[in-house]
Amino acid sequence: MATFTSTKPSEEETNKVYDRQIRLWGADAQRRIQASRVLFLGLGPANVELCKNLVLAGFSATVADHRKVDAASLGYNFFADAESIGKGVGEASVENIAELNPFADVKIGSTSSCSDAATAEKLVEGHGVVIVDVPCTRGSEEERKLINEACRKSGAKFLAVRCSGDGAAAFLDLGAEHTYVVETGEGAKKTTSAPQKASYCSYADAVGVAWDSVKNKKMAQPPTPFLLDRLDALFADRPTSKKRSRDEGDFVAFARRELAARSLGLDDTILARHARVAGKCPAHIAAVVGGVLGQEVVKAVSGRGAPTNNVFAFDAATGSGTALFASPVERAAAPKAAVPVDAIEL
């Protein structure tokens, strides 16, 4: 199993390499970042961008992907090349990932399925953050729930993201009690709030809520990317006897039934388009999603800035990103999130 061990930087080297980041979020936050390892489960479009952003920021990385490199994946995976076709995604990508930052440890992780809690706990062990790129893993919703529970047990931050040609949706779980501070103002006028606490529900609870409840007050129904994510999850987890290839007509009919059962609806043209582009996320959409979620990971690990709790939806048709709340427990009042900064260079 390939491992690229980092060189421990001196304080002078750290200040030189991470100067901009230290000025943005402070030396203590940067030390937390450098001490954290991220497990990327599936190196799809979203995780390729996230991996680039986070390794450059100072995180170490473990890459686990059961797939082989093919011609289609070269359209988004800039860590692989034409000579990599046929090789394992991790094997083909890990060396180029390591070259991003000599001070980050980068290695290939296990690609075994998680059939029980013990396997999931072993997979998560040693990682501070776990990011599941859903379309590029073979796991079901039940497997993602096992991985999330292992994260909650170990204290690791958990993200599950599904990115397609028409947008993306991501679920975040930073634990039952996440502590952070909010900074406002600049220079001599900068002030830091007292420690704030946010409580996150589990992934199982988040995906188990009524879909119609996941919307802001001015919305007639949940954002389209959220609904498409939930439809994709149900469609992928159908009984084996009902599964065929992902036929456009099958998906549209299935989606119509599921939405109608919940008194919701999407135009057939939206459903048909999604059936064609699901799992085919263009680089420019992945870059936006990877940039936003990269900042969420930095906030989560550094404890600086109010993070999203607990769903982010991005609509490529409108270019809008929306923070949503999916939980069986009513959200407690929280301070207004700070205006996002361009904390990561894309």
Image (tube, rainbow, N blue to C red):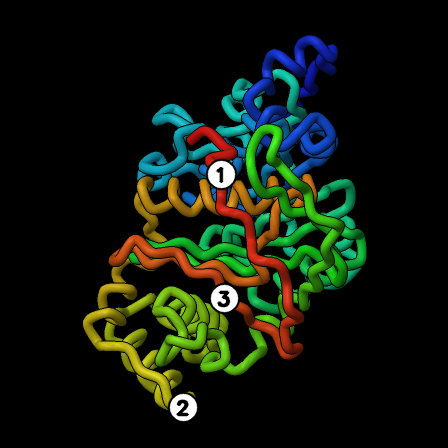
For residue 105, say whether it is visible. yes
Q: Residues within 10 Å of mark 2 (few under 14, many from 20)?
A: few
In-front residue for pair 48/138: 48
Q: Please tell me the numbered disc located at residue 261.
A: 2
User: Residues under labels 2 and 3: Cα distance?
Assistant: 22 Å
Up the image or down, 183 lies above or below 168; here it is above
- Which residue is tagged 1? 341
Residue drawn at the location 75% of the way across and 63% of the way down: 176
Which of pointers 1 and 2 lies earlier in the amino acid sequence? 2
Camera-nearest residue between 199 and 334: 334
Callout 2 secondary element: helix
101 and 93: which is toward the camera: 101
Instruction: Name the amino acid type tagged 1.
Output: Val
Residue at coordinates 58% horizontally, 29% vertically from top-left? 187
Q: In the rendering, at what x and y percent does residue 310 appear? A: 57, 62
Q: Judge by depth and name the residue closer to the eye, 155 or 90.
A: 155
Quarter of the image for the N terminus: give it: top right
Question: Does residue 129 appear anywhere in the picture?
Answer: no
First along the sequence among labels 1 and 3: 3
Mark 1 near mark 2, Cβ–Cβ under 8 Å? no
Give the image location of residue 162, x and y in percent.
45, 57
Q: Amino acid at mark 2?
A: Ala
Kindly indicate the quadrant of the structure image that contains residue 85: top left
Foreground: disc 1 or disc 3: 1
Q: Amino acid at mark 3?
A: Leu
